[in-house]
Amino acid sequence: MNVTTLSVMQAIRERRTIRDFNGEPMNKEAVMELLNEAIWAPYHSAKEPWRFILFMEDGRRRFADAVLKTYTKEMLEQYGERAMQGYCQLAQAHLLVVIEAAPRQKTFEDAFSAASALIQNLQLIAWERKIGVVWKTNDYNYDQRFLQSVGVNPGERVVGTLHLGYFNEDKIPRPKKRKPAEELLTYIDSI
């Protein structure tokens, strides 16, 4: 593997959400390497709170069909063909990060937060390896037709659907402006 190592700060500042994939093939090993690094996210439970469902190669069609089941007739007519091309040709992998929908609020929030940290780890590592990622929390992540079609079990929740693929560097989006932390900080220094 030929990887240029970025500093953590550099990766945080330079990483962008990539929605425009170029269709260059990716292998399962590349995704597994990302996951095996990303799982070092912190978690508070006795066991890791996440599991993954990965769609690649011909499996991308199953993912795309599951998404399209959630579209209205109008949406299918307007976006269906473009969605199929994006899901089945351009993006090379679709990864669902799934947790248990724990009945206890704290347990659920701990798991959700840990899975979110894992997703951020994955995005940063992917960026370092010149793999683009878009983290989706679309309505289909809550639609029973989609969930059943992709293998999410009853009592589980999708934290995010990640679309992965290679991209052309001339199409990297510009950074969004950030407010300085001082503008968002409430500082308390006395009783």
Image (tube, helix red, strand yellow):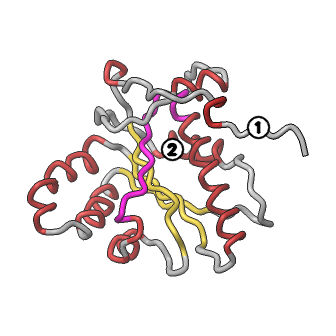
Crowding near the residue tagged with mark 2, few <14, some 14–19, many ≥20 C-alpha atoms within 10 Å: many
Q: Is residue 82 left or right of residue 39?
A: left
**Left or right: residue 86 compared with residue 141:** left
Residue 66 on the magenta segment: no
**Image: magenta residue range:** 125-140
Q: Residue furthest front?
A: 191
- Residue type of the residue flagged with mark 2: Val
- Of helix, strand and loop, which one carries label 2? helix
Q: Which mark is residue 187?
A: 1
- Determine if the magenta segment contains residue 137: yes
Give the mark nearest the N terminus, 2 or 1: 2
Residue at image point 46% right, 27% down: 177
Query: Three-letter amino acid code at disc 1?
Result: Tyr
Name the one closer to the observer, 25 or 113.
113
Q: Which residue is mark 2?
A: 31
Picture disc at residue 35: none
User: Which quadrant of the view contains residue 114?
Assistant: bottom right
Tell me how many marks there are.
2
Gap in angstroms between the C-alphas marked 2 and 1: 41 Å
Label 1: state its secondary structure: loop
Image x and y of residue 15, in percent: 51, 29
Which residue: 59% across, 67% down? 99
Q: Position of residue 166 (x, y in %)?
A: 38, 32
